[in-house]
């Protein structure tokens, strides 16, 4: 999902946002995807459906962090689990697919993420979901939670995979379909189907999304809520199409995988939206301690803190995951990317240290 490399600290001092989980079981979902289930720690790991875990691993002598969505539901599944799809040349995805065995202990950051919702038994909603490839992972946890918690709601899923053999959770989805009947409608779309495939196929385009939208929206007695997760191309065309169909931003939740901060920063700079890049002294409060940090031109607040061996929490370094979230107590910053924050969080003064650069003096940030 997200990735980064950082030097390993010689004397790590992890804060309360870190815990260790022991691997309970590794299940092979497809030829290139595994689900890793963890033992429940004491106290139990609390999480919301659709959130993710950041794994902190040592591979080839380096500390490496990656974030993976939880595929489980806290309302259904006794053990939390993440699903990891192998990426060609991917250091961590290959390590997790090939090397992780039951009994292994992995350090993680506690669950984070806003790709979730609350549930109530009286709701009557249609959860319209579009997933591509491993984007099914958080969707799976959410749809299981809907089906168990909201007996009057239903789920309409459009799931895009390369081939029938690469449909992650294929058997689990079929089993849920048998259990919940017409409350779960799954439409598969394969980009490279076999000769015997009779379902939807080809690249996911506007016409197909429009067809799916009209198909699942016929019953207007349900309140629609839209979830989109997958590769950038699928995400973009789906969100653009749904917007053109009248779906508001308040109705749509999406989980992004990638953000090009460098390109966004250059655009903002060309448009005159960034403060002059100067060396500034800032103050960071973390775990009850206060640090004075010098942020030089070109550095983000997170970069500067890590350079001074401050154990600031982080994960994606793309402004998407919120692991590095802090509250701006005073001063002003420029955020290159704020997609991980909700409008209410921004209004409350929260920033993402991985994409924030000082834009004034007297900056004080509290990591919460």
Image: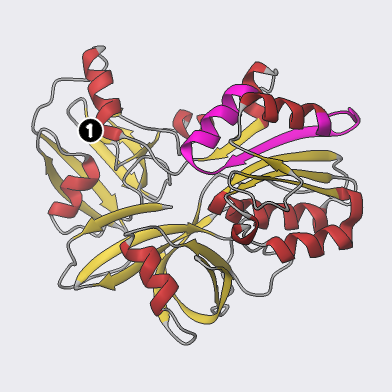
- Front residue of 164/17: it is 164
Q: Residue at x 21, y 25 (%)?
A: 359
Q: Which residue is mark 1?
A: 357
- Is residue 237 one of those drawn in magenta? yes
Q: Residues within 10 Å of mark 1 (few under 14, many from 20)?
A: many
Q: Tell me where residue 207 appears, x and y as whole percent.
A: 68, 24
Looking at the image, the residue that sits furthest to the bottom is 103
Asked if residue 315 shows in the view, the reply is no
Q: How many marks?
A: 1
Q: Is residue 34 above or below residue 135?
A: below
Q: Residue at x 28, y 54 (%)?
A: 4
At numbered mark 1, what does the secondary structure look like: helix, strand or loop?
strand
Q: Tell me where residue 189 appears, x and y as whole percent.
A: 67, 43
Q: Residue at x 76, y 49 (%)?
A: 119
Q: For the magenta stretch, what is the residue range? A: 215-241
Looking at the image, the residue that sits furthest to the front is 195
Q: Is residue 262 above or below residue 14?
A: above
Q: Is residue 181 above or below residue 344?
A: below
């Amino acid at each position: 999902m997200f990735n980064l490399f950082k030097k390993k600290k010689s004397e790590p001092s992890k804060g309360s946002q870190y815990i260790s989980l022991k691997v309970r079981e590794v299940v092979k979902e497809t030829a290139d995807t595994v689900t890793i289930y963890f033992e429940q720690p004491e106290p139990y790991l609390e999480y919301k459906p659709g959130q993710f875990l950041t794994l902190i691993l040592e591979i080839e002598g380096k500390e490496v962090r990656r974030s993976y969505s939880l595929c489980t539901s806290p309302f259904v599944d006794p053990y939390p689990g993440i699903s990891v799809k192998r990426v060609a040349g991917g250091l961590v995805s290959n390590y997790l697919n090939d090397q992780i065995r039951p009994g292994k202990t992995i350090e993680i950051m506690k669950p984070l993420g806003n790709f979730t919702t609350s549930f109530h038994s009286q709701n009557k909603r249609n959860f319209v979901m579009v997933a591509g490839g491993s984007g099914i992972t958080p969707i799976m946890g959410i749809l299981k939670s809907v089906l168990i918690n909201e007996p009057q709601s239903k789920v309409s899923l459009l799931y895009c995979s390369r081939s029938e053999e690469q449909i992650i959770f294929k058997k689990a989805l079929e089993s849920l379909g048998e259990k919940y009947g017409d409350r779960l409608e799954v439409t598969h779309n394969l980009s490279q189907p076999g000769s015997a495939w009779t379902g939807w196929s080809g690249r996911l385009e506007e016409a197909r999304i429009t067809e799916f939208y009209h198909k699942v929206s016929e019953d207007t007695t349900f309140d629609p809520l839209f979830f989109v997760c997958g590769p950038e191309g699928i995400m973009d065309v789906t969100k653009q199409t749904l917007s053109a169909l009248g779906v508001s931003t308040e109705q749509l939740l999406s989980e992004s995988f990638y953000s090009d901060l460098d390109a966004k920063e250059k655009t903002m700079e060309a448009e005159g939206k960034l403060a002059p890049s100067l060396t500034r002294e800032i103050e960071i409060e973390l775990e009850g301690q206060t640090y004075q940090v010098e942020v030089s031109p070109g550095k983000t607040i997170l970069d500067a803190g890590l350079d001074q061996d401050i154990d600031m929490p982080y994960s994606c370094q793309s402004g998407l995951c919120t692991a590095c979230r802090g509250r701006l107590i005073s001063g002003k910053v420029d955020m290159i990317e704020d997609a991980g924050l909700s409008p209410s969080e921004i209004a409350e003064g929260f920033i993402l240290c991985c994409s924030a650069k000082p834009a004034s003096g007297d900056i004080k940030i509290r990591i919460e």
